[in-house]
Image: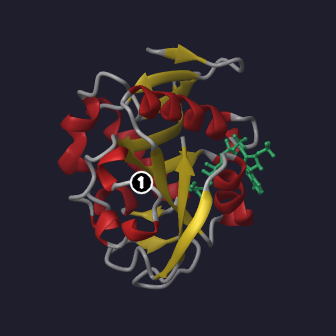
Amino acid sequence: MMHTNQNGYQFYPLDQSFLAPLNLLSDEVFGRDYLLQIGVEDDWEKIAQLVNPISFCVVKGGGLCAARISYPPGQWSHLSAFKKSQPELWPFSPEDVGYFKLSMVHPAHRKKGLGKDMANFAIAGMRSMGAKGVVTHSWNQSPGGASAQYVSRLGFEKVAETEGFWSEYAYDCNECQNDPCLCTASEMFLKL
Ligand SMILES: CC(C)(COP(=O)(O)OP(=O)(O)OC[C@H]1O[C@@H](n2cnc3c(N)ncnc32)[C@H](O)[C@@H]1OP(=O)(O)O)[C@@H](O)C(=O)NCCC(=O)NCCS
């Protein structure tokens, strides 16, 4: 365990021992098979071996409450998210820019500052790795507009928008309920 926040949530570095609960939480938050489809598993060991944890699982009372998955600066150009990004609109070169890939908080644990804590913890890790900025793709259809509001409060600014950003993945989106998912992503940039 690496950190306990003021509400007693325990942060653990992300590793494969969390795979089953992570899949269950992702099914509930985004839709069935989302985590399997987005291809994180290819990078699992690489993510877990980072000296500065920027990806973690959050546990309380023995259950998984939240998770964040992030990539260090210059180490995410292999992701399809990068190929759909517009680096020419960023203020820094891709080698200096990290990526926030996934953030999810179980509905019962939302609005208690957990999402913000996870982000701030990861931002500190990004800084220590020399990142000048962080990109994320905010989910426009996130319930209650939570995603857009959440990343804006962290200081991210919109640089672009992509319709059908997740349409290549065969998962059952909880929000648009289309197959493939037709939700829109806002590409957001945070200067560190
Ligand atoms: C987005 C999400 C991670 C936020 O987690 P959280 O732990 O509830 O967030 P926090 O309590 O730390 O709140 C952080 C900020 O987000 C905003 N926010 C959170 N939930 C919100 C909601 N339902 N509606 C509007 N704003 C919301 C608030 O502005 C808050 O800042 P403030 O307290 O300074 O005003 C969570 O709602 C979630 O998992 N949503 C579904 C998945 C998702 O959209 N993930 C993509 C994230 S980019």
Cβ at disc 1 under 8 Å from ligand 1: no
Mark 1 falls on what kind of element?
loop
Q: Is residue 126 visible?
A: yes
Is 7 situated above or below 170? above
Q: Residue, x 45% and y 62% (percent of image)? A: 90
Is 171 situated above or below 55? below
Q: Which of 11 and 109 is in front in this view?
A: 11
Task: Using the rendered view, name the quadrant where residue 147 is placed.
Answer: bottom right
Query: How far from the left and from the top, in percent, is residue 10?
Result: 54, 20
Question: In what quadrant of the picture does the N terminus appear?
Answer: top left
Is 44 situated above or below 117? below
> Identity of the amino acid at label 1?
Phe
Query: How far from the left and from the top, in percent, is residue 192?
Result: 54, 40
Query: How far from the left and from the top, in percent, is residue 182?
Result: 49, 83
Applied colour scheme: secondary structure
Q: Nearer the viewer, residue 149 or 88?
A: 88
Q: Would residue 30 be found to the left or right of residue 47 on screen?
A: right
Query: How far from the left and from the top, in percent, is residue 36?
Result: 30, 57
Task: Using the rendered view, name the quadrant where residue 93 is placed.
Answer: bottom left
Q: Residue, x 47% and y 46% (percent of image)? A: 133
Quickly name the residue at label 1: 92
Is 176 situated above or below 133? below
Q: Residue, x 36% and y 56% (percent of image)? A: 35
Q: Label 1 crowding class (10 Å Cα cut-off): few <14, some 14-19, many 20+?
A: some
Q: Can residue 185 be seen in this view?
A: no
Q: Would residue 69 be found to the left or right of residue 74 on screen?
A: right
